[in-house]
Image (tube, rainbow, N blue to C red):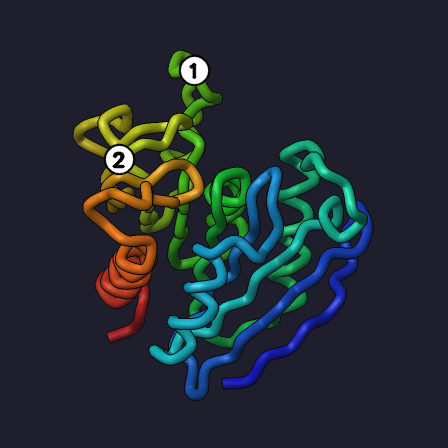
Amino acid sequence: MSSSEREVATPHGPGRLVTTRARGASATLLLSHGAGVGIDTRDLEVLDECLPRQGITVARFEQPWRVAGRKVATAPPTLDDGLRAAAAALRTRTPLVVGGRSAGARSAARCASDLGALGCLALAFPLHPPGKPEKSRLVELEAAGVPTLVVQGERDTMGRPEEFPDPLPDHVDLAVVPGADHGLRVPKRGDLSQDDALALLVEATLEWLVREVLPG
């Protein structure tokens, strides 16, 4: 494995791309972060730590608003512009999977088809704003147009697993992290430790990649 960091020019200022390359990579996973955090959340970090050992290159993209030191994300179209710029900068020769957490998951779903991605990984997908289930964002998942894995916490206030439709759209799979909140954090006295919750995330992601995305 090897790691690198580079600046990525976007229409809204420079972003930051941190890439951990797998030896003999079979796919590349491009991840972006949520609206109030950067690329150093534990879920994105654990994917960066574990997947390259399994032949998956992981690239984490920090949006320009975060690089500039702002505390609040810019409008969704600017996030999509950033993700597209990051994908172009990667110039990957392996199958591309786009993903992210929360706002980054929404952006990945909106951009997946246009970017030619073979899959979309949506961590803590914000199905609706907190307390406003009537304002559903399901249409973004429906429009992704590629195999999509949603990894959702059981206690996520922006979309509990039971709030997703049953059946799901044909191209969407749902993996539930028991007891987890929107940050995929579990209670200290819960049935699942935080390490176990993160291991579940990695396992679900790998299983889905092998089944839906990787060649052969």
Question: From the viewer's perspective, is residue 110 above or below residue 48?
Answer: above
Question: From the viewer's perspective, is residue 90 above or below residue 175?
Answer: below
- x and y percent of residue 17 in the render? 66, 64
- x and y percent of residue 34 in the render? 56, 43
Label 1 element class: loop
Identified by mark 1, the residue type is: Gly
Query: In this rendering, which labeled residue sits more in front, label 1 or label 2?
Result: 1
User: Looking at the image, which residue is at 28% across and 42% down?
Assistant: 172
**In which quarter of the view is residue 171 placed?**
top left
Q: Which residue is mark 2?
A: 169
Q: How many other residues sit within 10 Å of disc 2, few (<14), some (14-19) or many (≥20)?
A: some
- Can residue 51 be seen in the rendering of this structure? yes
- x and y percent of residue 47 in the render? 42, 64
Question: From the viewer's perspective, is residue 140 above or below residue 4?
Answer: above
Image quarter (top left, top right, bottom left or bottom right) of the C terminus: bottom left
Label 2 element class: loop
Of residues 75 and 130, the one nearer the viewer is: 130
Distance CA(mark 1)–CA(mark 2): 24 Å
Pick whichever of labels 1 and 2 is earlier in the sequence: 1
User: Looking at the image, which residue is at 60% across and 38% down?
Assistant: 35
- x and y percent of residue 179 in the render? 26, 39
Mark number displayed over residue 131: 1
Of residues 130 and 105, the one nearer the viewer is: 130
Identified by mark 2, the residue type is: Pro
Question: From the viewer's perspective, is residue 151 above or below residue 139?
Answer: below
